[in-house]
Image: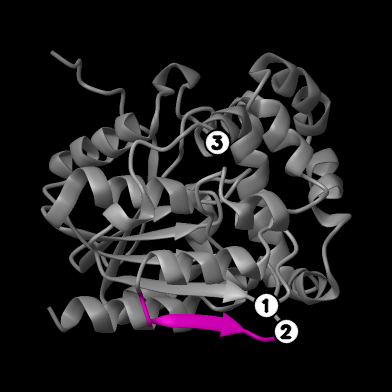
């Protein structure tokens, strides 16, 4: 018998009586990432549940597990909130947890939106088109997770250090987004909160990304809407194209002159599409 999973901390935004969507944040990140979309979600009648993964924010490291464990946590969280069916939005590494929820929770997930998403690690697209700045960390995680933890500790000691590492390789498309203080300030607040426990959230994400998934993309039967920036340096656009082919979806948005962080400036467009899809079912 499987024990009841330790539930993650979570953040609620939007209309508390609206259509339910669960947000899977990027890395390093937290559920606070989507806070700037609160007013938009209220206007749209969308309820957002944004959990922090283990090691991020206030979710204990002891809640760590694999992709199936995470899906079970989300199911239990939804049960406690009396939410039967829900949409899942997965951003960046959050995409792998969105896929896991769709696979393991079946019809409870009424649709997926994937923004700047990842594929399974051993695919040629992932091997060739992950950021050259960060791929060595992924590779090391596949062989020595303890070494990754030690390597990440000094990089996660403060939000200033973490931001300098994240922002240094950004293309001009992403730099332009963060030139807006209304985007940069809440993002840094989320990042500071995310790093309260040091590198353990990042370690959790890297481990789950590089380990073989207990499903394939072809096992995903939920309807998927896919977004990707053509200038994404973190997760190259060829990975997005691979996802589009593997998921058999023609509901795709490949945005010219956008990088990895365009979600932060496109909340309205993305959430409007989600609400329209949910309302039509």
Q: Residue at x 28, y 34 (%)?
A: 73
Q: Is residue 36 left or right of residue 80?
A: right
Q: Quadrant of residue 197?
A: top right
Q: Which residue is mark 2?
A: 257
Q: Quadrant of residue 193?
A: top right
Q: Is residue 140 left or right of residue 207?
A: right
Quadrant where the N terminus is found in the figure? top left
**SS category of the residue bearing label 2:** loop
Picture layout, residue 131 above or below residue 181: above
- The location of residue 2, given as percent across then percent down, is 18, 16
**SS category of the residue bearing label 1:** loop
Q: Quadrant of residue 149?
A: top right
**Is residue 100 on the magenta stretch?**
no
- The location of residue 227, given as percent across then percent down, is 50, 74
**SS category of the residue bearing label 3:** helix
Tell me which numbered mark, 1 or 2, is placed earlier along the sequence: 1
Tell me which numbered mark, 3 or 1, is placed earlier along the sequence: 3
Q: Residues within 10 Å of mark 2 (few under 14, many from 20)?
A: few
Tell me which numbered mark, 2 or 3, is placed earlier along the sequence: 3
Q: Residues within 10 Å of mark 1 (few under 14, many from 20)?
A: many
Mark 1–mark 2 Cα distance, whole angstroms, equals 6 Å
Q: Residue at x 60, y 39 (%)?
A: 194
Picture layout, residue 15 above or below residue 139: below
- Disc 1 and disc 2 in contact, CB within 8 angstroms: yes
- The location of residue 111, given as percent across then percent down, is 26, 66
Q: Which residue is mark 3?
A: 205
Residue 50 seen in the current view: no
The span shown in magenta is 249-256
- The location of residue 221, given as percent across then percent down, is 23, 61
Q: Which residue is mark 1?
A: 230
Pick whichever, 37 or 242, lies toward us. 242
């Amino acid at each position: 018998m499987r024990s009841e999973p330790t539930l993650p901390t979570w953040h609620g935004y939007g209309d508390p009586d609206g259509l339910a969507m669960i947000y899977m944040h990027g890395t390093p990140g937290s559920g606070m990432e989507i806070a700037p979309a609160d007013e938009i979600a209220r206007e749209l009648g969308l309820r957002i549940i944004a959990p922090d993964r283990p090691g991020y924010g206030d979710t204990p490291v002891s809640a760590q597990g694999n992709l199936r464990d995470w899906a079970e946590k989300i199911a239990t969280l939804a049960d406690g909130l009396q939410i039967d069916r829900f949409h899942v939005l997965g951003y960046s590494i959050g995409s792998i947890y969105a896929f896991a929820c769709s696979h393991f929770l079946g019809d409870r997930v009424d649709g997926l939106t994937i923004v700047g998403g990842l594929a399974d690690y051993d695919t040629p697209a992932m091997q060739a088109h992950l950021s050259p700045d960060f791929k060595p960390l992924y590779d090391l995680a596949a062989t020595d997770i303890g070494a990754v933890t030690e390597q990440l500790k000094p990089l996660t000691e403060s939000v200033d250090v973490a931001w300098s590492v994240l922002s240094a390789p950004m293309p001009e498309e992403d730099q332009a987004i963060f030139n807006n203080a209304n985007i940069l300030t809440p993002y840094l607040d989320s990042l500071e909160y995310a790093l309260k426990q040091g590198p353990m959230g990042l370690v959790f994400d890297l481990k789950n990304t590089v380990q073989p998934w207990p499903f394939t993309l072809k096992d995903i039967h939920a309807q998927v809407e896919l977004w990707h920036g053509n200038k994404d340096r973190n997760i190259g656009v060829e990975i997005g194209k691979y996802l589009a082919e593997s998921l058999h979806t023609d509901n795709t948005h490949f945005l010219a002159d956008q990088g990895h962080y365009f979600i932060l400036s496109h909340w309205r467009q993305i959430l409007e599409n989600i609400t329209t899809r949910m309302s039509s079912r």
